[in-house]
């Protein structure tokens, strides 16, 4: 019986390890450049800031920023990058156009993180 319990515990631990590793290795759907391009082309920033964004565009905006959060910044402090991106993601999820407007500062962000 002890042998069975030990094997069962080992199998569960191995399964959890594999699922955690595969989740951590999940590739972002979009590159940072792709996210910036489609948001600029579709004017998603402006729509969100004005509170005139459709559900579909909001979902695309959120998906883009969640993808950006999985990347390391091309330059600059990774912790600061994550904090800034998470503020944008939270504003989108909360549908808070004011917080979104404060979180989005293209020039400052590009100065710190864009190569």
Image: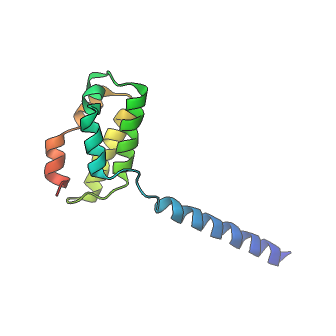
- Give the percent coordinates (x, y) of residue 97: 30, 27
Q: In this view, does 16 lie above or below 45?
A: below
Q: Is residue 80 above or below residue 63?
A: below
Q: Which residue lies furthest to the bottom in this view?
A: 3
- Give the percent coordinates (x, y) of residue 60: 39, 37
Q: Which residue is drawn at 26% across and 53% down?
A: 80
Q: Which quadrant of the rendered structure holds the C terminus?
A: bottom left
- Residue 90 falls in which quadrant of the image? top left
- Residue 76 falls in which quadrant of the image? bottom left
Q: Residue at x 18, y 54 (%)?
A: 114
Q: Which quadrant of the rendered structure holds the N terminus?
A: bottom right
Q: Residue at x 36, y 50 (%)?
A: 30
Q: Which residue is drawn at 26% across and 44% down?
A: 36
Depth check: give the residue in front, 113 or 43: 43
Depth check: give the residue in front, 58 or 6: 58
Depth check: give the residue in front, 89 or 4: 89
- Give the percent coordinates (x, y) of residue 35: 30, 45
Q: How is the image coloured?
A: rainbow
Q: Let me know if residue 36 appears in the view.
A: yes
| Residue 45 appears left or right of 18 | left
- Give the percent coordinates (x, y) of residue 66: 39, 46
Q: Residue furthest front?
A: 41
Q: Let me know if residue 94 appears in the view.
A: no
Label tally? 0
Q: In this view, does 12 lie above or below 38?
A: below
């Amino acid at each position: 019986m002890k042998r069975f319990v030990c094997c069962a515990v080992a199998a569960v631990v191995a399964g959890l390890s594999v699922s955690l590793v595969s989740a951590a290795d999940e590739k972002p759907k979009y590159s940072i450049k792709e996210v910036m391009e489609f948001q600029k082309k579709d004017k998603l920033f402006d729509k969100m800031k004005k509170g005139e964004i459709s559900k579909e565009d909001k979902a695309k905006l959120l998906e883009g920023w969640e993808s950006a959060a999985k990347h390391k910044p091309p330059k600059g402090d990774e912790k600061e990058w994550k904090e800034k991106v998470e503020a944008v993601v939270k504003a989108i999820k909360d549908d808070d156009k004011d917080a979104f407007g404060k979180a989005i500062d293209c020039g400052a962000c590009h100065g710190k993180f864009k190569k």
